[in-house]
Amino acid sequence: MRLHRNLCYAVIDGLLLIFNEGQYADKVIQSLLKRDKRWGSRDRSFVAETTYDIVRWKRLYAEIAEVKEPFDRDNIWRMFAVWATLKGIKLPDWKYFENTPSRKIKGRFDELSKIRKFRESIPDWIDQLGMQELGEAVWTKEIAKQNEQADVILRVNTLKTTKEELQNQLFDEGIETEFIKGYDSALKLKERANIFVTKAFKDGLFEVQDASSQLVADFLDVEPGMRVVDACAGAGGKTLHLASLMQNKGQIIAMDIYESKLKKLKIRARRNGVHNFDMRVIDSTKPIKKLYQKADRVLIDAPCSGLGVLRRNPDAKWKLEPEFIDRIRGTQQEVLQQYSSMVKPGGKLVYATCSVLPSENQNQVVAFLKTEAGADFKFLKDKKILAHEAGYDGFYMALMERTK
């Protein structure tokens, strides 16, 4: 591979924003890709994947390069040189790469790779937390898997097409996919591609949604004609899946504390041909009280640490703080106790997170069932998904039924 100056400059600029300004990697990359209209798909993929790669391995590369935060521009170039050397890319004779100690870089890599927190490039406290909660053997496998690039998985919009039809249409557009056993609506891309420019996407035939995430709506056990509440709907990926499963019949109430996220759902729903939903902003306790014991099904896709989806959001491990994990556990319990009041007797509740920590998952369910609000519920089943076992994102979901 030959390095091109303008592409490398874009990566360096992006990394400075992500590391020093605390900006989100996906947003930074989106704006970098608009920098030069002449860039082809290979150029764009170099910028995106190299940026994500260096974000993912920040701690390891900084240690090898012997640089410390906050990084200046020269520090980032040194980390870039580490990345290129370890990838076997020949460094051009630019001033940034003068005196790059290639042999020393490889030696330091071999040495640091014996220590998990460097090998997997994670903060000490996350390493300790994962080990405490999952045990050393499981955590070692899980965090290694979380450092692999995630597959691109599509969820077929069954309101408009079938899996087979979508696969054929994408093939005609130059994109090859394969079915995944055990995931009814999923198609996996054989090679990464910009699927958002396809006619199939513009026609609302699919959404991008990880295979594990696709199991959540199924777990809720919905039927056409029901009243279903998606209580932490966000931009509505699971709302749209629920609408498909309900064949656009009945009512889905998509709720969130952020109106801006629900506005994104409105745009996606229009493209998907989904019309059996209402949106409600949770700006006080009123929207919850109005639905007291009125829902057949309630989905709580709770805010969480996101430690099950680090493959997609590698910058999250640098933004997370121990205090946030403590706070979010409190929020999860509050949300469970408040939002569960919308389930009617005989109705069902799903509590889900994209975390792999038992303290955010099964422990929260156990604690909820012991409270006054949880006393009316019985536990039916749960599903714990670890990325290193499933091959897809880490997730948790628990199904409960209101008995009275």
Image (cartoon, rainbow, N blue to C red):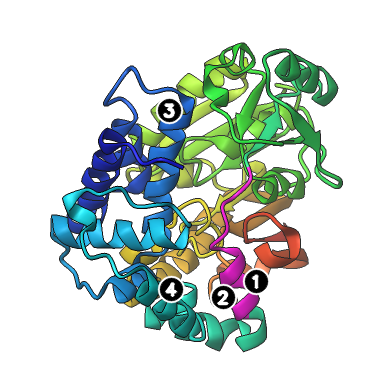
Disc nearest the viewer among 3 and 4: 4
Disc nearest the viewer among 3 and 1: 3
Disc with the residue nearer the chain's start (4 vs 2):
4
Q: Given the image, on which type of amino acid does mark 2 rest?
A: Thr
Disc nearest the viewer among 2 and 3: 3
Q: How far, Cα to Cα, is label 3 from label 4? A: 45 Å
In the rendered view, tell whether residue 309 sits above or below residue 230: below
Where is mark 1, residue-wise?
375
User: Does the stretch in magenta take in 92?
Assistant: no
Q: Given the image, on which type of amino acid does mark 4 rest?
A: Lys
Q: Quick one: 326 or 36, which is closer to the camera?
A: 36
Q: Quick one: 157 or 335, which is closer to the camera?
A: 157
Residue positioned 40% across, 80% down in the render? 108
Q: Secondary structure at mark 4?
A: helix
Residue 29: quadrant of the picture: top left
Where is mark 3, residue-wise?
264
Disc with the residue nearer the chain's start (3 vs 1):
3
Crowd rating for badge 4 (residues with CA inside 10 Å; few <14, some 14–19, many 20+): some
Residue 37: quadrant of the picture: top left
Magenta stretch bounds: 139-151
User: Does the stretch in magenta take in 150?
Assistant: yes
Quadrant where the C terminus sits is: bottom right
Where is mark 2, residue-wise?
371
Q: Are marks 1 and 2 in contact (CB under 8 Å)?
A: yes
